[in-house]
Image: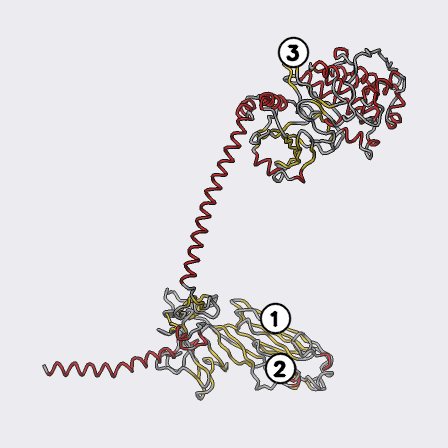
Amino acid sequence: MWFLVLVVGIVQACTFLLLPTTQALDQLEASQLAMLGCNSSCGSVSIPYPFGMNSPRCYLNKNFIINCTNNSSPFLWNSNIQVTNITTDGQLNVLTYRAASCFNYSGKIEELSKPAYLKLSKFKISKTNKFTVIGCNSYGYLRGIRGDKNYSSGCITTCYNSTFIDTSSCSGSGCCQMEIPDGLRHVNIQSYRFSNYSRTLDFNPCTYAFIVDDTFKFSPSDLKNIPTSRRFPVALNWAIDYDNSSSSLCSDHSSRVNNKEGYICICNPGYEGNPYLPQGCQDIKECEKPELNDCIYQELCHDTPGNYTCSCPEGYHGDGRKQGQRCTANEPIWRMAVVGVSVAISALLMVCSFFYCGIQKRNINKRKEKFFIENGGLVLKQLLSNIEGSMQRAKIFTEDELKKATNNFDKNEIIGQGGFGTVYKGTLDQTIIAIKMSKVIDPAQIDQFINEMIVLSQINHPNVVRLIGCCLETPVPLLVYEFIRNKDLNYHLHDDGLATRLSWKFRLRIALETAGALAHMHSDAPIHIIHRDVKSSNILLDDNYTAKVSDFGISRLVPLDQTQLSTVVQGTWGYMDPEYFQSGLLNDKSDVYSFGVILVELLTGEKAVSSTRTANDKSLATFFTYALKDDRLFQIIDQRVKKEGDPEQIKGVAELAKRCLRYRGEKRPSMKQVTKELQEMITVSQGKHIEVFIDSYDATQPLLPPPIDFLDATSSIGPHSMRSQEMTH
């Protein structure tokens, strides 16, 4: 028993004695740059492995041998190249000699030094160095080997006297420098002077050439003399050769960096030391040195392998770093509770808002669906899908599409407004459109509206405004037309600034195109259409003054087996057929009468109803008829028409207008006949005489209802108020 106690005591004593020795060894290895048992310095220069001295175990191979002369000056193996610094990241600093050529006043070479050599077997000259030549009218050669090819270059200086020398830089005046390519070795340097040496001998007797690192600064004294003993610092690059094995010298906690010449090792971030030695990269104890860490509170700095962490004192939060989130005092519990409740309430409000918006959106969609059905959308959609052939079908737009096209029906997009509603300008698929929004619509007229949509969508005439489609998701259907930018005929005839611009040629063409459109509607369309509101403000003009008949808001469809309809009287004063006004029977001759008024407007430039004329002549139709009866035609026509038009042609148009204005519709020509006669008048020869007959008329039948003082050309009659004459699509 006593023997066992003795053994345990001896073991504990040995452990106590060995523990400091092991700790000391770890500290020694951490601070060492060289292999254990090898010298780690020569003089003041540290010699880290893979470089070494003396024993082969102290260096990697012969390329890394350092000769230490008198234990004070290290040299590369088997050379006179003195080493001043070695780093483990692949840089080696050495001292080299300069080349020189010196002259006397007779021009003879007084000193011709041997060219400067720098022979390197494995190491390469760093591109951070520069080849430098100092002297006046001098040049230097640099020759070497780069890879497996020869390399040569040079540098020239010029100067005539000391005042021309730029001492601030080596830019060619007394001193020149050039970059050195990477990977250069076995260098040979020579210096020369090419002329005018006698002028500069007193301040520059020699030319010098050398390689030097970026620490060199040119000085005027360098021109006078650079002693033979002076050597220049040069940076070299070193690397470990690749071998066939997959292993490398890099130790734990280090990384291998490859380059063209080989590879080097570097310690990972948070570690330091010599990465070529076993356990050479040691953890940096950042918390032991305040300058190595960013912690606000040094006592709360904690070292970790390869890094460190910072903490905040109790009652504070953050990352504890000076350049980070720092440390902020914690919020009181009551404040945190308030914040929590606020967040909860906000979340609840967001959820409620989400559900509210969802319900609202669903209600809006239901309302749109309700309007769509009430406005005959299902029926219209089915009928449009049944249209066959190449005819372009009208499209049914959504309300959102038209809102987007008009910037949510912005008032700045309004291009026309009247008693019937509003017209907006919009852009749809990069096409400018006009959107007509009526104020009210009779629910009983929905079927009629659907029929009109079907018919108008099939009208393909160049002088009828094209209906693009409609929107049925609103309380009142919206109609979408092509946009005509040049306003209407009423504007061009009666605006004081534009009235004289419309030539007689244009007026005839507008009359012919309008007549052709009406004739097409009366006879050639799939279902005959009576416009019922033909007037100058419903004839739009495009950029080429081509006529476009528009506004079918009160138009009526006439079945093929009928010639007239019994309807509530609607129309515009001054253009309305008096026979239709009194009988309530509508037929295509009602449009003929209205067209006759337009012909008179084109001839005279007068408005259909004007308060400036006498009470009996407020109606243009009455005024025109009496003028013809009194043979005063050329007294009432527009001055430009009188100037440009052929008298016989003017008489022909006047006679046609008079026939269109006959009280009895059966005596009026059809629109087809009107179109034919206008075409003949335009093409007839200038010499043909056209008779103008002034027929008698029944004085007991007025051309219009008795004039009413407060009505003018902008007034309409019927269950709905029509738009003003300034209204455009």
Sequence-first tag of 1 and 2: 2
Q: Is residue 302 left or right of residue 94?
A: left
Q: Nearer the viewer, mark 2 or mark 3?
A: 3
Sequence-first tag of 2 and 3: 2
Q: Which residue is label 1 attached to?
A: 153
Q: Which residue is label 3 attached to?
A: 562
Judged from this view, the residue extending furthest toward the bottom is 70
Judged from this view, the residue extending furthest toward the left is 1
Mark 2, secondary structure of its residue: strand
Total labels: the figure holds 3
Examine the rendering and report whether any part of residue 193 can be seen.
no
Q: Quadrant of residue 377?
A: top right
Sequence-first tag of 1 and 3: 1
* Residue at position x 43%, y 80% in the image: 47
* Residue at position x 37%, y 64% in the image: 246
Q: Is residue 367 left or right of residue 112?
A: left
Q: Look at the numbered discs 1 and 3 and tell me whether their residues touch, using CB distance below 8 Å.
A: no
Measured as percent of width and height from the top left, residue 53 is found at 40, 81
Q: Nearer the viewer, mark 1 or mark 3?
A: 3
Q: Which residue is label 2 attached to?
A: 100
Return the residue nearer the eye: 199 or 151. 199
Measured as percent of width and height from the top left, residue 321 is found at 45, 69
Q: Quadrant of the N terminus?
A: bottom left
